[in-house]
Image (cartoon, helix red, strand yellow):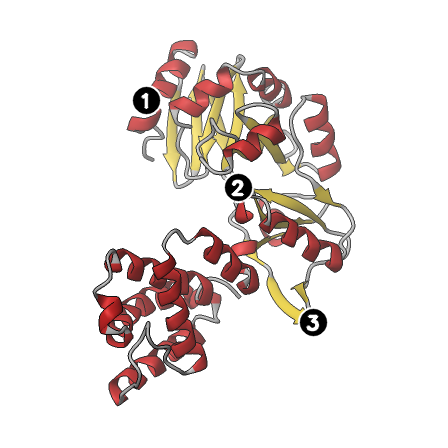
Amino acid sequence: MSSAISSSNINTWNFISKNLPGIELFKKGRSVEIEYVGKRIFLPPYPEIDSVTLIRKDNLIIPENIPNDWVAQWKANGSNIRIFAIDDVLIAITRGGYLLDWRPYQSIMDSPLKENLIHATMNGRYILFGELVGPKSLVKLCMEAWREYLNGDIGYILFDVYDRIADIFIDLKNVKQLAESSNLLFPPTEWELDVDVLNKRLRDFLEICDGEMWEGFVFKNRERGNFLEIKEKTRKWRLDETREFALEIYKRRSKMPLSWKIFEALRKFIIEGYLDPPITIRESNPSILEIRNDILSILKESKERAMREKADKKIKEVLNVLVDAILSEEVRGSEGIKKAKNEAIKIFRKVYIWSQ
């Protein structure tokens, strides 16, 4: 067991311990155990969920092996926070198993969200799982878009609920009803799966803050169930894990034109096999071609999801060697070249290792 308290949330802890004298929190992995007035309350983490496998057909991107009776919820780009309440005091825990930082916690306590969240826990029966979003949340992205969407500075989108008595996650119909009765947001949901609609939605998401507000979809069975069932019957489809969209996203988000030019030069040489003067030198040599072959082998290896982390570490080193070898002398002398190279390599890894 370790502590759920850190320097950024010490004021949160001070507030909770003052209002709940004698409370203790213990962290094991991402789980948190509460001891209070002789009771032990276990706050489990949300299961880690896998990405869908994608296939392409008739100009559509299709999530494979998703049952027709599942739903697709819009995936908000926020902080995954689980919520519990004891005696009208909120216990807010991050994905990693720590107390929520003081500033967003204080923002919740100063807003109508506090009473809404307390109501939704139903006197300690439910553990809420949701995304904390908005300008006063932990994620400082799309602030104006979130402010308009929320009609405020902080909001909580309730995506799943764990029933401590029944020891299961409740079905989505009841999650939606609980959200409505507690005046909380429920994620926009595609209740009928239509590939054309899903592809159009992804394109729409890309146009809102370059895909930083709605990251994609989470596919779920309607009934939910225990932890094992949740893990097996939940999948995610992120925009930036889909190669077509990842290329567009990083081009839009790239702050340095030179970094995108270097990325394009890497892409053309590695994927298509040719150099691109004046960004690169004009001709390759055997050592450069050998580096390219090494990279292609790593990319092939990364198609196995379990190998991606290992492949990512290997390719980062090799890309650093390659970029120095193929960039033209003029580009190597550009202002900010080091930062531009690092960003270009990061984009390549994101697109070709971590997307499909």
Residue 126, percent across and down? Answer: 61, 27
Mark 2 or 1, which is nearer the eye?
A: 2
**CA–CA distance between discs 2 and 1?**
25 Å
Q: Quadrant of residue 325?
A: bottom left
Query: Which residue matches tag 2?
Result: 77
Q: Which residue is mark 3?
A: 57
Q: Residue at (76%, 54%) from the top-left corner?
A: 193
> Residue reaching furthest bottom?
286
Q: Amino acid type of disc 1?
A: Ile
Instruction: Read off the residue under disc 1.
Output: 10
Mark 2 belongs to which amino acid? Asn
Earlier-in-chain disc, 2 versus 1: 1
Q: Which residue is painted at 51% across and 55% down in the image? A: 249
Of marks 2 and 3, which one's residue comes earlier in the chain? 3
In the image: residue 278, left or right of residue 241: left
Residue in view at x 34 percent, y 61 percent = 258
Compared to 206, does 266 lie above or below? below
Left or right: 282 in relation to 49: left
